[in-house]
Image (cartoon, rainbow, N blue to C red):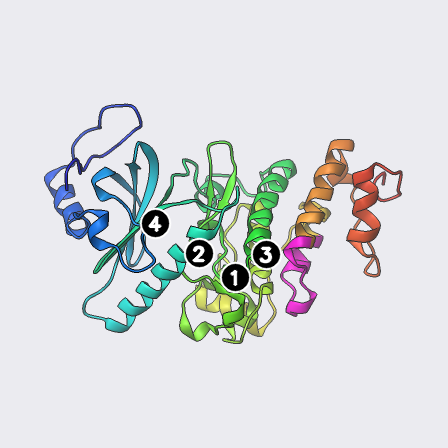
Amino acid sequence: MRNFCWSKQVPLNQKLGRRLSLGEYKRAVSWSKYLVSSGAAIKEDGEEDWSADLSRLLIGAKFAIGSHSRIYKGVYKNAEVAIKCISLPEEDEDLASLLERQFNSEVTMLFRLHHPNIIKLVAACKKPPVFCIITEYMPGGSLRIYLRNQNPYSLPPKLVLKLALDIARGMQYLHSQGILHRDLKSENLLLGGDMHVKVADFGISCQESERFTTNEFIGTYRWMAPEMLRKKNHTKKADVYSFGIVLWELLTALTPYENMTPEQAAFAASQKNVRPPLSPECPLAFTSLVTRCWAANPRKRPHFNEIVSILEGYSESLKEDPDFFSNFIPPSPNTNIIKDYLPDCISGRKSALCHA
């Protein structure tokens, strides 16, 4: 493939950085040899709109690794991109088939999703035993990595609100398209340079109408809803549960169930109704929402339409009252928070809640 170059860095509008060492080059070639072909040669039915022209792809430094994937920074058609290469194990046909289905699902969904809080698909390449997905590059990395570099309970409530609202809006859009993410966690939330969040990694996502059980895929135990852990049919409310765990992460900058193994965390959440501890230091406005999101009964969890409305109401109230989070009084159980609380705050009417 012409102009295909391996480099440690490929910054825009600059010369390529240092060349890879021989060892790095050999490891890279073990993956790249499957990608050296033109996009036209690998198209199948329905692929014409997203197939990559690999002659215009430059792959640079690897910055993430998974069990069956590697993610590189690169340049595609003069734009910075992230390149996820997925390796199909030739010795395990069942696993290879599963990974291919996940690839097809992710590309198909990303191709039709267009929202400021959803990662953008640039192109893809399907050439067994290695597939690749090319997306926009998010320079801030994952939310998980960002939180690991923060002190516990150190994120200002205003920043927590901004990040949570970005995530909720992305999920609201996803659900409006009839799609369940099924692996929402801080590792799959990517940050732009301005702390803008985008939802990513749709490998095990599905249409809500498919109603798969968890026998058909592997999620992430610490973020997984109890009904999924029990291998039951699940709805959009499973994503809401995961959002509750992510919101807890934003509030604490800690790992959920950090003193447990993933298996112990799964048992505790699904069989004992255990949840990560909420510190009294966390603003009540957030803890009240977290407890609703991770309710054991999915029907008691709010939809993302309501979550976005709640968070937008918090944002409007914070503009009017800088001490909103300190003064917040949770609504009574019989109060409809959307109908009775948020409209008053948004419209500026003088209510006891807004001026508590």
User: Can residue 58 be seen in this snapshot?
Assistant: no
Q: Which mark is residue 109?
A: 2
Q: Quadrant of residue 92?
A: bottom left
Task: Determine the CA span between mark 1 and mark 4.
Answer: 22 Å
Residue 115: x %, y % from top left: 52, 45
- Lateral position of residue 196 relative to residue 24, left or right: right
**Mark closest to the chain's N terminus, 2 or 3:** 2
Task: Determine the CA span between mark 1 and mark 2.
Answer: 11 Å
Element type where label 4 sits in the image: loop
Q: Which amino acid does the dot numbered 2 rest on?
A: Met
Q: Is residue 335 magenta?
A: no
Q: Are marks 1 and 4 in contact (CB under 8 Å)?
A: no
Which residue lies under the disc numbered 3? Answer: 176
**Mark closest to the chain's N terminus, 1 or 2:** 2
Query: Most prominent secondary structure in the magenta stretch?
Result: helix
- Badge 3 density bin: few <14, some 14–19, many ≥20, Cα 10 Å: few
Q: Which mark is residue 50?
A: 4
Which residue lies under the disc numbered 1? Answer: 180
